Each structure stands twice: as structure tokens, then as C-alpha cells.
Image (cartoon, rainbow, N blue to C red):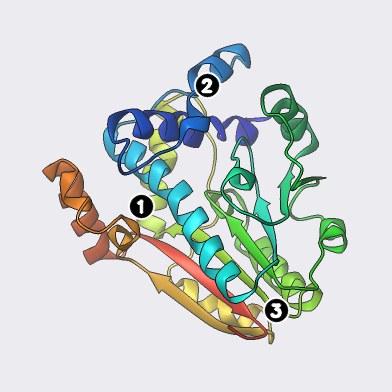
Amino acid sequence: MDTVSHTLFFPLLGRARASRKWPELFPDPQAAQAEEIAAQEKTPAQALDDFSTVIYGLRHRNSVLEAQRFLADHPGASVVNIGCGLDQLALELDTTVYNLDFPEVLKMRSRWIPKLDNEVDLPFDVTDPAWLEKVDSSRGVFLVAPGVFYYLQPDDVRTLLHRIGEAFPVARLSFDSESPFVTRMSEKMIAKKGTPCEMPFKVKDPRSLKSASSKISSVDVECDLWKYFPAGLYETLPWGIRARFAVLRWMKGIYQVTIDFGGK
């Protein structure tokens, strides 16, 4: 695998660590094999600090919650997990889940994760438009890209948004992102942890993505990430982690973006 592909181990290791340290916040038993998988695949990626651990646990939680919200309004809609890596959304969603990732990543995935009946693999680079033709859009499409757009060029993201708008009459895309300053800090952090890699997607205002397609009806940016935690449980996190969330909220340093196409 290339350097970008190895970065998929950061969320895997982070989710496993988060589920061990805060099981009530991040129940994620399928991530328990993380250390074994990382060792067997000989990745240089290493576990990150507690705050990053929470971010990775929260990223998985956000993906599931946002998918469930869309499915509540669009029963039977397809879900596309962009850059799926070793995520297992199909375990938590009662609908067809398309796992989109590089062929070599899906090959590795098949060695560790039994394929479920509601899963369909899409062995493509996300920038290859061929994969959009493989998705059933008859009941709507929810797309999630946890931790993916960081590694794409801004123009590639805009092109992808345009293609989604043209391919799917009703769709929603959800992804996490960071301000340019925080993204540069993230580049330094993962380089220290074994996988130096550029993160080109440094966009000051994600709302500017609305101009990528006339089919985009809205772009919502949520900086209060603790809203995704179960009621009353956010306070169980250490004070230092909650303080960092507060600072990032104030500086709009990290956020969840939700883009609707063709209607909400």
C-alpha cells in the first residue's frame, strides 16, 4: 500500500483505543482487532494521543448517526462509505452499504473482515467517475467520507461534488474537515507517527463548495462536535479534552460538513 493507504490505520487504532477507554461513548467492538491487523499488515502507523483517539471514535459515531438520519427520511436508500478502509458501517445500518476504496485496500480488507450480505465493494479511486454508475440511487443516496477529503486536492473535491449532483437525484454527503491551520498541525502529527503525507484539502470556508454544483441545495457546517455525543456523557471526558474541543469550536478549527443535493 502507498503512504495514503497506510493512514487508514490511524482511525482503526484510534477507534479501538477509544472503545477501550470510553466504552459508553464509543461502543465499537469490531475495532478490537486493530492492533493485530496493524501488526500483521506491517504498517508504520502508530496510535495517537487521547484527543486524537476521541476524534477517531467520534468520526465513526458521526458517520453512523448521519446515515441513520438520512435513512429515517429515505428508507432503503443506499449508503456509500467513501474511503471505507476497515470501517464496518454495514453492521450498524439496515440497508445496502457500498464500500468504496482502492483495490489494494479492499483486498486487504477481505483478509480481515467477512463480507456481509448488505455490502457491495467498489474497488475504485474516488476520483474515478466509474463507481457512480454502480450505485443504486432509486431511493436516494447517503455518502460519507470520514477522514478522506484531507488527502484530495480541492479541485478534485469540487469535481466529485459536481459528479454526485449529476449522478444522484437525491443525495446527501457528510464529511469531516479542518481549517487550513489545524490541517497543517495534523500533517505534522501523522508524520511524527510514521506516515508523512500531505493533506492538500485546505479550504478556509467549506460553504464555498456550494458553487461546485447547481444541484447542491444546502451546505451545513457544524463546529459543535460534542452535539454528537449521547446526552450527559460528554462531561465524562477528561477536562483537558473538553477544553480542546472548546478552543477548536471558538477558532472553527474542526467541523462536520453536510451537503444536500436535489432536496433535503
Q: Earlier in the sequence, mark 2 or mark 3?
A: 2
In the displayed structure, does residue 90 sit left or right of residue 205?
A: right
Give the distance between the C-alpha atoms of the residues marked 1 and 3, in whole angstroms: 32 Å
Above or below: residue 208 compared with residue 85: below
Q: Earlier in the sequence, mark 1 or mark 3?
A: 3
The answer to whether one can see residue 1 in this image is no
Q: Residue at x 72, y 33 (%)?
A: 105
Residue picked out by circle 3: 170
- Residues marked 1 and 2 touching at CB (< 8 Å): no
Residue picked out by circle 1: 182
Indicate the secondary structure of the residue bearing disc 1. Answer: helix
Above or below: residue 26 compared with residue 131: above
Observer-nearest of 136 and 40: 136
Q: Earlier in the sequence, mark 1 or mark 2?
A: 2
- Residues marked 1 and 3 touching at CB (< 8 Å): no
Q: Identify which amino acid the numbered label 2 is placed on.
A: Gln
Give the distance between the C-alpha atoms of the residues marked 1 and 2, in whole angstroms: 30 Å
In the displayed structure, does residue 100 sit left or right of residue 62?
A: right
Observer-nearest of 72 and 32: 72
Observer-nearest of 125 and 12: 12
Q: Identify which amino acid the numbered label 1 is placed on.
A: Val
